[in-house]
Image: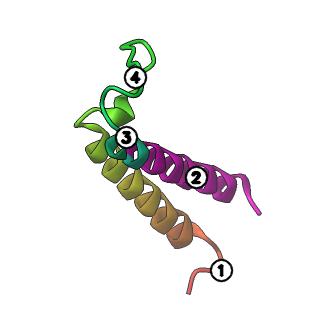
C-alpha cells in the first residue's frame, strides 16, 4: 500500500463518518442536544455537501492522474 492509497482511504473514511454524523444529527430532535457554534464544523453547513463532492472529485482526478503516469498503466 502506498502513501497515496492510505491518504485516499483516510479521506473516504472521514467522508463516511461525517455523513453518518450529519444523518444522525438530522434524525435527532432539535431540543435534545445543546448546540454550540464553536463545535460546529463546516461539514454541517449547507456547503458541506459541496465540500464532500469536491473532495470526491479531487480524489478521483488524482487517482486517474496517478494511474496515467504509472509505468504499468495499460
Q: Where residue 70 appears, x then y in whole percent?
A: 61, 71
Position of residue 41 measured from the top left corner of the image (x, y, whole percent): 41, 26
Question: Across the whole image, how many numbered discs are drawn on residues?
Answer: 4
Tag of residue 72: 1
Near-viewer residue (30 or 49): 30
Disc 3 + disc 2, Cβ < 8 Å: no
Which mark sits nearer the N-terminus, 1 or 3?
3
Residue marked by disc 2: 13
Kindly state the secondary structure of the residue where label 2 is placed.
helix
Q: Position of residue 42 (x, y in %)?
A: 36, 29
Read off the residue under disc 3: 28
Tell us which disc is closer to us: 1 or 2: 2
Question: Which portion, as a residue range, is magenta?
Answer: 1-22
Task: Name the residue: 51% across, 64% down.
Answer: 63
Residue at point 71% right, 52% down?
Answer: 3
- 3D distance between C-alphas at marks 1 and 2: 28 Å
User: Which residue occupies the foreground of this view, 49 or 74?
Assistant: 49
**Mark toward the viewer: 4 or 1:** 4
Say which label, 1 or 2, has the lower sequence index: 2
| Position of 34 relative to 22 (above/below) | above
Asked whether residue 68 is drawn in magenta, I would say: no
In this view, the mark in front (1 or 3): 3
Kindly report the distance in space between the C-alpha atoms of the residues bearing marks 1 and 3.
49 Å
Amino acid at each position: 500500500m502506498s502513501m497515496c492509497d492510505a491518504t485516499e482511504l483516510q479521506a473516504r473514511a472521514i467522508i463516511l463518518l461525517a455523513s453518518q454524523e450529519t444523518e444522525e444529527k438530522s434524525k435527532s430532535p432539535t431540543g435534545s442536544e445543546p448546540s454550540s457554534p464553536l463545535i460546529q464544523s463546516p461539514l454541517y453547513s449547507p456547503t458541506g455537501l459541496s465540500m464532500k463532492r469536491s473532495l470526491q472529485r479531487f480524489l478521483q482526478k488524482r487517482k486517474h492522474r496517478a494511474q496515467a503516469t504509472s509505468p504499468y498503466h495499460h
